[in-house]
Amino acid sequence: MGKTILITGGAGFIGSCFARRIFQGQPQARLIVLDALTYAGNPANLPKEMKASDRFEFWYGNVNNITLVNELVSKSEIVVHFAAETHVARSIFDNRIFFETDVLGTQTIANAILKFKNRIERFIHISTSEVYGTALKEPMDEDHPLNPLTPYAAAKAGADRLVYSYLRTYGLPAVILRPFNNYGPYQHLEKAVPRFITSAILDEPISIHGNGSASRDWIEVEDVAEAVDLTLQADLEKIRGQAINIGTGTATSVLEVARTILKLMNKPESLLSFIPERPGQVDKHISSTDRAKKLLGFQARTSLEQGLIKTIDWYRKHRDWWEPLRWMRTVPILTEDGKMERY
Ligand SMILES: NC(=O)c1ccc[n+]([C@@H]2O[C@H](COP(=O)([O-])OP(=O)(O)OC[C@H]3O[C@@H](n4cnc5c(N)ncnc54)[C@H](O)[C@@H]3O)[C@@H](O)[C@H]2O)c1
């Protein structure tokens, strides 16, 4: 019998990519997905054959439900914790749920792992590069100071350090991954790359915050799923207690990404439209890739251009998936001077 892997947030963008990878690639593994199916979760991200399989269980529920989380952790050997509120812009106008889900939800998971410590072999916590804030040095390694710039980033930093404290206090078999900016198929339209692609498909303006100079380390989601998979396979004694960046080591500005998308789609640059800078914008992110290479043997495979070509193709072919989300491409934000901007 293979291991049972509990995946929280497995109906979301990255969690479902990881679940599909493990379901296909590890025929012995049993998967339990726990997901609250918020506006960001979508059961259509999980293929029919997975849902029909006796190796798969889906639980509709909240990571803050202690009884349910205890029950599911008690049946698992491995926990991979993706569930979170994830949209930076939403956290600017309504952040309470970010702290409830991202911090207290992580506490519920960590407490359950503590309760079943003798059973749980590995706990992979999915943190984020947002915990660092803007790069103070380049590339950013895992010892970079944590200067979260938005409520989302602060909540994720809280969760990241909570897991670290449980590891030091109680010796949990935990590893913290800090992926940089993910993009790829099945990403909610509120995020930059799918918003740009679907706006271009619709011949609608592509809004860019500020002058678009903010630059990020963009990583294709299947590369991230591979990194999480390698974290499952790695020698625990080597990785236990580590925080590990998952990035490409290359930074590209938001404007450059938008221009590349327009070029690849044969659309005019006149679609670009500039709106005021988003509060709490990170100016630059670029990942050091050394630790991931050394501890996991991980190196991103997909160049930005290859990844964008694949992602554009997916959104062109899956309009039925994204059409219902079209109205959620932007969210209203109250700016400092009390005006409403849509980000
Ligand atoms: N997308 C990125 O660029 C990125 C980069 C680095 C790290 N991350 C982290 O990776 C993880 C997954 O991100 P994503 O982009 O797939 O997010 P997503 O918003 O697409 O998915 C989040 C999933 O969590 C579920 N969820 C939310 N609240 C829940 C709750 N209270 N209980 C149970 N399930 C709940 C949602 O229904 C959804 O399925 C998050 O922890 C995020 O912080 C994301």
Image: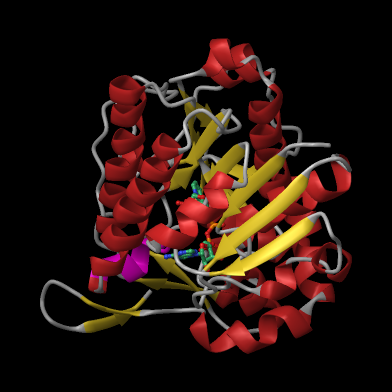
126 w.r.t. 298: above or below: below
Identify whether 321 is placed above or below 99. Answer: below
Image quarter hosting the C terminus: bottom left
Query: Which residue is rendered at x = 64% and y = 74% of the image?
Result: 42
State the extent of the magenta-drawn residues as a range: 85-92
Q: Is residue 16 visible?
A: yes
Q: Colour scheme in the image?
A: secondary structure
Asked if residue 334 lies left or right of residue 268, the reply is left
For residue 163, side relative to residue 4 (left or right):
left
Q: Quadrant of residue 211?
A: bottom left
**Residue 63 seen in this snapshot:** no
Q: Nearer the viewer, residue 320 or 241?
A: 241
Residue pictured at 76% horizontal, 81% vertical: 319
Image-based side of 250 in relation to 19, left or right = left
Across and down, in percent, residue 51 comes to 80, 68
Residue 80 image position (x, y, % from top left): 57, 43
Residue 102 locus on image (x, y percent): 36, 54
The image quadrant that residue 193 belongs to is: bottom right
Judge by depth and name the residue closer to the eye, 316 or 47.
Answer: 47
Principal SS element in the magenta part? Answer: helix
